[in-house]
Amino acid sequence: MPAASSAKKKEKIIGTVEHYFDRIGVAIVELKAPLKVGDAVVFRKGETEFTQPVASLQVEHAQVDKAKKGDQVGMKVDAPVKEGTEVLAA
């Protein structure tokens, strides 16, 4: 019925960057969907966008292989990201 949703590419928003630690290159992401090591994700804010695999995840400073919706995870990123950046499934 809604034309807008069918015309738009199906994009799954996995989460949003809540904070970025520039000295260590780690983004804190609030998850809206499960995420696991090995998944590929896209970071997008405005015209800036890059894709990378998830190499490691941490929940409360503990290394994990997967995280669930609602978790706040720390993940190493290949490029600086700003708060509010969307994290999408690649």
Image (tube, helix red, strand yellow):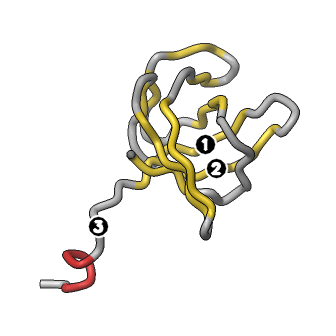
The span from disc 1 to disc 3 (Cα, nearest Å) is: 23 Å
Q: Which of 71 and 88 is in front in this view?
A: 88
What kind of residue is marked 2? Val
Q: Where 5 sits versus 60, above or below? A: below
Q: Nearer the viewer, residue 62 or 82?
A: 82
Image coordinates of residue 3 in percent, x first then y, are: 19, 85
- Quarter of the image with the N terminus in it: bottom left
**Rendered residue at 61%/42% (across/down):** 29
What kind of residue is marked 3? Lys
Q: Mark 2 points at which residue?
A: 17
Q: In which quarter of the image is residue 76?
A: top right
The furthest residue to the left = 1
The kind of secondary structure element at disc 2 is: strand
Are there few (<14), some (14-19), or many (20+) residues within 10 Å of tag 3? few
Q: In which quarter of the image is residue 34?
A: top left
Q: Mark 1 points at which residue?
A: 29
Q: Name the residue under label 3.
A: 9
What kind of residue is marked 1? Val
Q: Do the residues labelled 3 and 2 touch (CB within 8 Å)?
A: no
Q: Earlier in the sequence, mark 1 or mark 3?
A: 3
**Rendered residue at 35%/54% (across/down):** 12
